[in-house]
Amino acid sequence: MDAIIEAKNLGLRFSAPTDKKGSLKKWVLDAVRGRVRNRHFLALDDVSFRIERGESVGLVGRNGAGKSTLLKLVTGIVKPTAGSIAVRGQVAPLLALGNGLDPALTGRENIYLNGAILGYEKAWLRTKEADIVEFSELGGFIDAPVRTYSSGMTLRLAFSIATAASPEILILDEVLAVGDAAFQAKCRARIEEIVADGATVFFVSHNLSDIEKLCTRAIWLDKGHVIWDGPVADVCPVFGQFAALPFLPIAEFLPDGVSDGTVPVVRFRNRRDGRHLLTSAREEMKNIVLKLSDWACEGTVFRAFPDARPGTEPLMRFLSFAAGVHAFAAGEAEAAPFRNRPGVWKFEKTVGHVFASPEPGLIPVHRLAVPGVPGFRIAVGDAERDAIQAADPSFVPAGEPFYVQT
Amino acid sequence: MQDTPVPNAPRLRPYRKPGFAHDGFLVAELVKRDFKARYDRSVLGMFWCVLQPTLTMGLLYAVFSLFFKSAIPNFPLYLISGIVFYQFFVETTTTAMRSIQENAALITKVKVPLWTYPVTRAVSSLVNFLFALIPLFCVVLLTRVPLRPTMLLLFFSTACMLFFALGIGLVLAALAVFFSDVKFLWGFACMLCMYATPIFYPERALTGGHHWMVYFNPLYHVIHFSRAALNGVVPPALEFAACALFAAVSFGLGIVLFRALKNKFALQL
């Protein structure tokens, strides 16, 4: 049997004008000058997947990853600019609050209006009207204008209409987040019923636990690419880790993505004193991210080996009890002065193993300090060192540089 | 909410087959919505459909009867026939123009044939126009114009105006998605049309050196045709042709442009 949704090398290229809202005058002027300035933007690039009948698929990804665009392609609202998508079934979007409901109309009138928009047959809607009213728990309010409803009531009505029929493909775009707990539970039960009926579900949510409960498969999108398409139990926890540390390259999180066995060393800069902190531990990064008002992340600056290997030395971090700043030592010889004053300096961790001597293809990492002032600034490469020294000549090299791969 | 089929009852399909015939239900629901939403919370409700053209005519009559009354036989009928058709044109084009943007929330979520939005607005305007014919025929009766079979020709001029205005509405709707300027320009264009068309001044006022220009004004042809029909005159074949030609060209252009641009709407909204 054919897959219910089959995407092959799907691409969508936006060519939006530089300003969102177009102005005719500007467009005419630019056209006359021979340059209509369009910003080309790949919302989706080379996306391929097959979804079988009855699968429930969660779409995860950061904001702007292309999730909504993909849903629009599945719904058929937008046509792809590259590749193809075949959708072999009736698609029913669960409309977000108020999208299809008109406030001036009564709930009952809205059943027909929204039903018509969703593509239901009139005769069929008539037979289902009572069921819809019952499921929405609106009772006598069904004949009152929707503008008099609370937001929970509006949602209940919209949900009841959208799920009155079991569609072949149900699209849920951040819908379970609204309404009271009891109705949410009822919605979940209804969606599970639809899934049990053999519907294919496409679910977009930032609530990963909802996706984990409802879906069996997850597709992780980032910048228009499929990062990982796999069982929800594999994808979601890893995406969750990434979502907590979004500045790290995604490859750091993928189980087979780290091929050379190195760990990323991320540099944070203290906003108050400009001192640097290096770390390769994810738990620590998460803690720092919680205090981002103090620390600015400068991203992965180099990669280190988690274990010692020929030619490498451990890069160790020490904390000054008095000043609260960090010092870094490459190798035990450099660490000795810190280790010898245990009440003043505390050993914190080994960030990773780095090369102690220059080798072809490696770049130097300089530690710079102001004499007499504890703490270091870290400069990756000679250019960065020169920039720091040009801005503040009191910084001088503290120890020999160590060498890393970036 | 399980489907429990009644024995011997035909099994109903939940979803309509894609196609023209079934989009009728959607358009009907959208038109109903248009009217309910427009007259929501108004005391007089649908009565405004009749009241609005009556008041407009009353006002213009009060002003312009001072100038043109003597020059035009049966000035009230002349005036209201012009106003009613002009309003039909303006309402259709203006509301159709806004239809895509005003339904942006839906268009970016549900796949519905996009033409239903401007067509809905045109149908709403047509219904409004039919209500406005009530005061028009009141004037016919009050001014003792005999009811003649030529008045059935109004069906023809109404159809021409509908397709002419819908064609322009489709063009404007498509352009307004990309350029908001269109909305402001069209407001100005409508005003221009009002002064360029003999609505409240006599057609003979245009017999100067620029007389020929009025023949390129589609509104003039439809209104001229309708006035002739109301006065019991069968317009010459050339007038039939002019009305039909303008409607066909405009509608054709509208369809071509709308179809060419519609796939880009959802990304622009």
Image: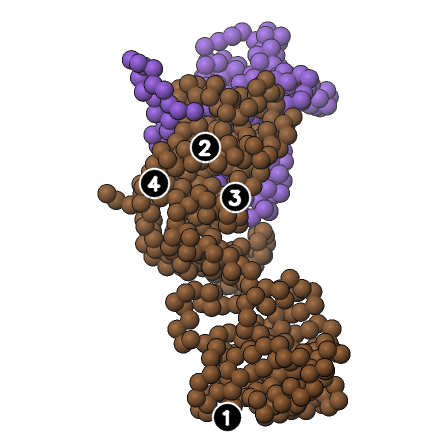
Chain colours: A brown, B purple
Location of residue A276 in the rendering, given as x and y in whole percent from the top left corner? 65, 78
Label 4 and label 1 in one chain: yes
Q: Name the residue under label 1.
A: A357
**Are circles 3 and 4 on residues that touch, CB within 8 Å?**
no
Location of residue B11 in the rendering, given as x and y in whole percent from the top left corner? 32, 20
Subunit of label 1: A
Q: What amino acid is labelled 2 in the image?
A: Arg
Residue A121 appears in the rendering:
no
Q: What amino acid is labelled 1 in the image?
A: Ser
Subunit of label 4: A
* Residue at disc 4, secondary structure: loop
Q: Mark 3 points at which residue?
A: A174
Subunit of label 3: A
Few, some or many C-alpha atoms within 10 Å of disc 4 (few <14, some 14-19, many ≥20)? Answer: some
Q: Mark 2 points at which residue?
A: A190
Classify B48 as above or below A304.
Answer: above
Label 3 and label 4 in one chain: yes
Few, some or many C-alpha atoms within 10 Å of disc 2 (few <14, some 14-19, many ≥20)? Answer: some
Few, some or many C-alpha atoms within 10 Å of disc 3 (few <14, some 14-19, many ≥20)? Answer: some
* Residue at disc 1, secondary structure: loop
Label 1 and label 3 in one chain: yes
Q: Which of marks 2 and 3 is in front?
A: 2
